Amino acid sequence: MKKVSRRSFVAGMGAMPFALWLQKERIPIGPLRKTWVRYEARTTEGQKMLKIYADTVNTMMNSTTAGDPRSWIFQWYTHAVRPDRTKAGEISSIYGGGASPNKTLATDAWSTCQPHFSGDEPSFLPWHRMFVYFFESIIRKASGHNEFSLPYWNYSVTGAAHGVIPPEFTNSSDPSLKWLFRSNRNPGVNTGTAIDASDPGALSLDVMKQTTYEPNGAASGFNADLDGGIHGNVHVDTGDSTNMGSVPWAARDPIFWLHHCNLDRLWASWNKNGGVNPGGPWLTKSFTFADLNGTKVTATVDHFDSLSKLDYTYDRFEPSPWFKRPLPWPFEVAHPTPLQIHELAEIPLTAQTTRLAMTTAKVPQAPQEAFTAHVAKLAPDKRVYLVIKNLRSDTHPGVTYQVFIDVPSGRSLNQASAHRVGTINFFGAVTHHEVAPNQPDSKFFSFDITDIVKGLQANKLLQDKPVVTIVPSGKPAADAKPVVGEVSILEQ
C-alpha cells in the first residue's frame, strides 16, 4: 500500500486521519516524546498560560479572518453556529458561492457538538476532548509558545475559590486580559461571586461515584450524569442566554474552554479510579476538526478514549470516591422497579415553587405499599433513585432548579439541606433550529436518594406518599416555559 504523506492529503483537500496527524505533528514514541501538563488556572503555571491565552484570543478575534479555521468565529461555530443565523447562511456569507477547502471544512465541522445536534449522548466526552485538544494546538501554534497548555477551571475546589471564575476573566480594562472578559455573564460572576451562591450543591462531584459510563437502568452513568449535571449547571450558572447559558452561544466565551478542560480532567480521573469506557462500534465513530495549521483532520473515538494515547496530562486528578467500584464493560443491564410516580403529564415549572405529590406506581411489578414501609425493609444491595425525564423548554430559563423531597410544611428551603436531592438544568433541553424536529432525547436526570430517604425515615420525616419539590434558583425567563414530563422513584 502506498504511504500517504501529509502534503498529499492537503493537496487533495482530504481529511487527514488522526493517526497520521499525530505522527507528523508529534514525536509519538521514545524518551523525547513531549508531554504537556494542563494546570489549574489559579496556580503559578496556570496564570502564565492564561496570559498567553489572552494574547492569542485577541489575535484570533481581531487579526484572523473569520473564514480561517484558526479564527475565533470558526472555532466557536465548530461547537455551534449562533442561533440567530443559520449554518448555511453563515457559510455563504463568509465563503461566498465558490468552492474552497476552508468552506468544505466549515461544512463538515460546524455545529457538530455531540450530543446537542445529533442525539449521540455517549460521544459527549470524546467529542469535546477532541475539540479542546485541537483548539489547544491552535493556541500553541498561533502564540509561538510551544510550552502552552490550556488551564482548567476547578470550580468544585473547596475554600474561597469555590465556584469563583478566575480573576483573569473579569478585568475589562486590562489591555491584554480584557479579551477574556464577557459582560453578559450572570450578575455577580464578574465581581467574584461564586456561580453556585444561590444554587448550593450544583458543583458537587457526586458524578465520580457512577459505576458505568453509559446509563444502566435508573442510573444515568458517568457520561450523561456529567453532561446533564455539573456540565450544564456551570453553563447556566455562569452565563445568560446569549452566553454560556445557551448551547449555540457558549463557545463564544473564553471561559468555555477552561470549563471543558476541567470536564475532561474529571473523565480522566474517573478512568484512573477504575471507570471503564464502552467498547464496540462506539470506538470507530469519527469527527472532523481543524488543526493548528488549519488542516482538516478526522479523529476517531479510539484515539481519544484514554490520556495514555495522547500527549498531555493534568497536574492533579480527583481521588477515588468511597462509593462502589465501576463495573466492567460490557455490564449486565439493570431493570429498576417503580415505587412512586407523579401522574404522567407535562409538569410546567414556573417562577414559583412546584410541589409534586407522588403516588404508588400502579404497574404489576411495583410493590403496593407505603413508601415508608418499603424503605424500612430495603435490601442492603438495593438503591433508590429519583428520576426526572423529558425536560423541554421553549428558550433557556437562565436558571437551574433545586430538587427536594418531603420538606416539612413551614420549613424554609435554606433549612432543608437534609431533604435536598440535587440540581436540574435545561441547558440541553432547548431544541435549536439546526436540529431535526422530533429528534429523540434519551437523557434524564437521576439522583441516588437511598441515604437521603433512610435519613428522613430515621428522623420520622419521610412520608408514605412522598412530595417532590422543585424550586428555581432565581427568576426564570418569562418566555422559557420549561416543563418536565415524568418524575418517578425507582428501586434498583
Image: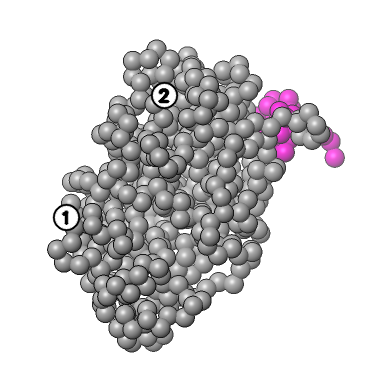
Residue 246 drawn at (x, y percent): 35, 41
Q: Which residue is mark 1?
A: 352
Residue range in magenta is 1-26
Query: How many C-alpha atoms fall within 10 Å of the one at disc 1: few (<14), some, or many (≥20)?
Result: few
Residue 279 left/right relative to 221:
right
- Can residue 300 be seen? no
Which picture quadrant has residue 186?
A: top left
Question: In the depicted view, which residue is nearer to us: 440 or 169?
Answer: 169
Residue 321 drawn at (x, y percent): 53, 56
Indicate the secondary structure of the residue bearing disc 2: helix
Number of the label disc, if any, that sits on residue 394? none
Describe the colour scheme in one phrase.
Answer: one colour
The residue located at (45%, 42%) in the rendering is: 157
Residue 464 drawn at (x, y percent): 26, 79
The residue located at (84%, 36%) in the rendering is: 2
Q: Seen from this angle, which residue lies furthest top?
A: 175
Q: Nearer the viewer, mark 1 or mark 2?
A: 2
The residue located at (33%, 40%) in the rendering is: 195
The residue located at (55%, 25%) in the rendering is: 45
Which picture quadrant has residue 147?
A: top right
Task: Give yes or no for residue 15 being in the magenta stretch.
Answer: yes
Identify residue type, mark 1.
Gln
Task: Give yes or no for residue 221 being in the magenta stretch.
Answer: no
Q: Seen from this angle, which residue lies furthest right?
A: 1
Residue 356 drawn at (x, y percent): 23, 68
Number of the label disc, if any, that sits on residue 168? 2
Can you say which quadrant of the picture contains the N terminus? top right
Identify residue type, mark 2.
Glu
Q: Are marks 1 and 2 in contact (CB under 8 Å)?
A: no
Indicate the secondary structure of the residue bearing disc 1: loop
Query: How many C-alpha atoms fall within 10 Å of the one at disc 2: few (<14), some, or many (≥20)?
Result: many
> With respect to residue 204, does 369 lie above or below?
below
